[in-house]
Amino acid sequence: MSLVTTTTKVNLIDKEIFSVELADKEIFSIEFFTIDTLTGLRKNISQFNDVNILNPLDDQGLIYESGIWVNKSIIATVDPAKFVQGEIPTPFPPVSEGDKYTTLTDFQSGKLEVFLNGLKLLSSDITIYGNNQFSITIDTIITDVVTVNYIKP
C-alpha cells in the first residue's frame, strides 16, 4: 500500500490546482473553474471581478459581503439541545383530520417537520398555529403515529 507523499495546497489567487502525489507520482489533479453561462467559456476563479481571496487558510469559505466574495473563517456553533427529533406530539393517538397537535416546547418558524407513520409530510399538508401547535390535512386512524422534528428558538 502506497502513502501520499506530497500534496499541493490550493492558492486560489496564483494557481487553482490541487494535486496529490502518491509515491512521487501524481494520482489526480483538480482545477477549480466555472462555466460562464453567457459565453459558455471556462473561467478560473481568479478571473472574476467580484472575488477577492487573500491569504487562504484551512477552514475558510467564500462569503458574499458588500458585493464581493471574500474568504473568511467559518465558525458555526450548534447547540444540540435546540434540536428535537422523533417527538410524539399530543394528542396521541391522532384523532381526526384538522385536530391540533401540540409539541412539548415552541419551535422556530419554518423549522417543523411532521411525519405520519415515518413518512415526511409536505408543508402543504401542515397548518401551523402559533409556536407549538399544528394540524395536518390527512385523515388519520388510531394506529397511525405522528412524530415531529423541530428546532427550538
Image (tube, rainbow, N blue to C red):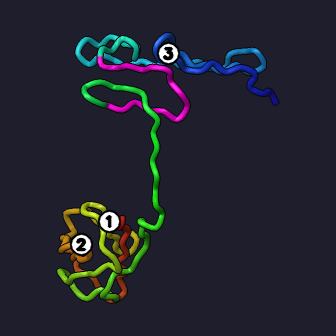
Which region of the structure is painted magenta? Answer: 50-64
**Tag 3 secondary structure:** loop
Identified by mark 1, the residue type is: Pro
Position of residue 54 measured from the top left corner of the image (x, y, whole percent): 45, 20
* Residue on which disc 3 sits: 16
First-in-chain label (2 vs 1): 2
* Residue on which disc 1 sits: 153
With 94 as the anchor, is 10 left or right in this view?
Answer: right
Position of residue 123 measured from the top left corner of the image (x, y, whole percent): 23, 62
Residue name at image x 25 percent, y 26 percent? 67
- In the rendered image of this protein, does residue 4 appear above or below residue 89? above
Quadrant holding the N terminus: top right
Identified by mark 2, the residue type is: Asn
**Tag 1 secondary structure:** loop
Q: Are marks 3 and 2 in contact (CB under 8 Å)?
A: no
In the rendered image, residue 53 lying in the magenta stretch gets the answer yes
Position of residue 71 measured from the top left corner of the image (x, y, whole percent): 42, 27
CA separation, marks 2 and 1?
A: 9 Å
**Tag 2 secondary structure:** loop
CA separation, marks 3 and 1?
A: 41 Å
Residue name at image x 48 percent, y 33 percent? 60
Residue name at image x 32 percent, y 69 percent? 114
For label 2, count other residues whose C-alpha is less than 10 Å away and answer few (under 14), some (14-19) or many (20+).
Answer: some
CA separation, marks 3 and 2?
A: 48 Å
Q: Are marks 2 and 1 in contact (CB under 8 Å)?
A: yes
For label 3, count other residues whose C-alpha is less than 10 Å away and answer few (under 14), some (14-19) or many (20+).
Answer: some
In the rendered image, residue 17 lying in the magenta stretch gets the answer no
Residue 38: quarter of image: top left
* Residue on which disc 2 sits: 131
First-in-chain label (3 vs 1): 3
Identified by mark 3, the residue type is: Glu
